[in-house]
Image (cartoon, rainbow, N blue to C red):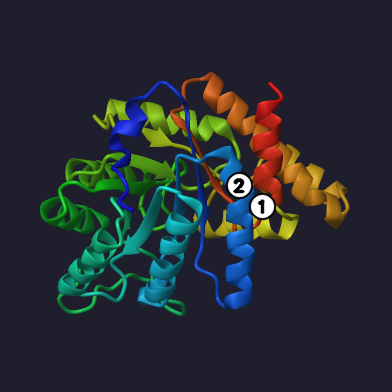
């Protein structure tokens, strides 16, 4: 089974819907992930992505579960790939593995520094920037669809928003086909980001990435990690709710985000499902009621 580049999918009028998984740590986690995939499958996502661990630690697991998502569920699968811990030649080997497995879309990322380190350092013979990885893919696998990441509220390592946008433009000019954003909870951050991208000459689709919050502690950790704003209303709603009710509050917030984004012309939405089905299904079922 061989996939198709997502580039042409964005040209269609229908909004795109996608879900992100992460490689499970053990067999029990793998079963939960695949069960989540089974429950989401009837909603026909346009693609699913699967992340790639720092330092290539999940290389084999990512490939294994990407194949299962493709073969058992018929999903168009977009594996992530990062520069962390790999030489240029190793990255080409991994890309060839993905190609041989039938994948035709890659989420190309520089990647975060390994745990315990604060700055990114390429290995000897490795790549320094996400734009380098995009160029490598475009040069050697020209039929691949390439996604890259974008930060509506600025990458934590960028000295300012203008510098961050310049780096994003470099990735786009290197051959990226679309951008998937880091999580955000205030849609104005996305709309402002899209406007600034257009003003800087970035004209590829920008897919909003949304996290259905599971708990107040979780969202505070995520916001601190990626420097995303936490709206006071969402924070208050979560603080006042019982722990068991917080996932439903988070899913409803994300549902209202999706409705607003689609009404204002977003090309679709990408859900960070965290290998759990309930919140994603609540959002999808909520959209079906309209």
Residue 3 lies, in percent from the top left, at: 32, 48
Residue 137 lies, in percent from the top left, at: 19, 55
Residue 70, image quadrant = bottom left
Image position of 279 with respect to 59: above or below: above
Residue 192, image quadrant = top left
Image position of 168 with respect to 276: above or below: above
Q: Residue at x 72, y 60 (%)?
A: 217
Would you say the residues marked 2 and 1 are in contact, meaning their CB atoms lie under 8 Å apart?
A: yes
The image shows a total of numbered marks equal to: 2
Image position of 265 with respect to 173: above or below: above
- First reached walking from the N terminus: tag 2 or tag 1: 2
Q: Which callout, 2 or 1, points to the residue nearer the camera?
A: 2
Which quarter of the figure is the C terminus placed in?
top right
Distance from the alpha carbon under mark 2 to that under mark 1: 7 Å
Identify which residue, 108 or 37, lies in the foreground.
Answer: 37
The local crowd at label 1, few if under 14, some if 14 to 19, many if 20 or more residues have their Cα within 10 Å, is some
Residue 219: assigned label: none
Residue highlighted by disc 2:
40
Check the image and name the residue furthest to the left: 139
Residue highlighted by disc 1:
277
Q: Residue at x 37, y 59 (%)?
A: 80
Q: Is residue 113 left or right of residue 45?
A: left
Identify which residue, 287 or 200, lies in the foreground.
Answer: 287
Q: Secondary structure at mark 1?
A: loop
Residue 245 lies, in percent from the top left, at: 84, 49
Q: Residue at x 41, y 43 (%)?
A: 180
Q: Is residue 233 left or right of residue 32?
A: right
Q: Secondary structure at mark 2?
A: helix
Specify whether residue 60 is in view: yes
Image position of 7 with respect to 65: above or below: above
Identify which residue, 77 or 261, lies in the foreground.
Answer: 77
């Amino acid at each position: 089974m061989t996939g198709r580049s997502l580039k042409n999918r964005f040209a269609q009028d229908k909004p795109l819907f996608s879900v992100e998984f992460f490689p499970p740590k053990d067999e029990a986690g793998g079963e939960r992930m695949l069960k989540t995939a089974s429950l989401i499958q009837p909603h026909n996502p346009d693609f699913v992505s699967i992340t790639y661990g720092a330092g290539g630690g999940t290389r084999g697991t990512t490939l294994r579960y990407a194949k299962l998502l493709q073969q058992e569920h018929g999903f168009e699968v977009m594996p992530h790939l990062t520069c962390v811990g790999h030489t240029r030649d190793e990255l080409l080997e991994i890309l060839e593995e993905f190609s041989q497995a039938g994948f035709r879309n890659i989420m190309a990322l520089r990647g975060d520094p390994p745990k315990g380190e604060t700055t990114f350092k390429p290995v000897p013979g490795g790549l320094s920037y996400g734009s380098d990885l995009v160029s490598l893919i475009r040069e050697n696998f020209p039929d691949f669809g390439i996604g890259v990441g974008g930060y509506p509220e600025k990458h934590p390592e960028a000295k300012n928003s203008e510098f961050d946008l310049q780096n994003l433009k470099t990735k786009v000019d290197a051959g990226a086909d679309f951008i998937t954003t880091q999580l955000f909870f205030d849609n104005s951050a996305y709309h402002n980001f899209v406007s600034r991208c257009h003003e800087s000459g970035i004209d590829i689709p920008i897919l909003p990435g949304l996290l259905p919050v599971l708990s107040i502690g979780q969202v505070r950790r995520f916001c601190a990690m990626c420097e995303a704003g936490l709206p006071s209303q969402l924070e208050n709603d979560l603080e006042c709710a019982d722990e068991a009710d917080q996932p439903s509050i988070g899913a409803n917030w994300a549902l209202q985000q999706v409705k607003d984004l689609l009404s204002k012309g977003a090309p679709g939405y990408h859900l960070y499902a965290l290998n759990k089905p309930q919140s994603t299904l609540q959002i999808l079922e909520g959209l079906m009621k309209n």
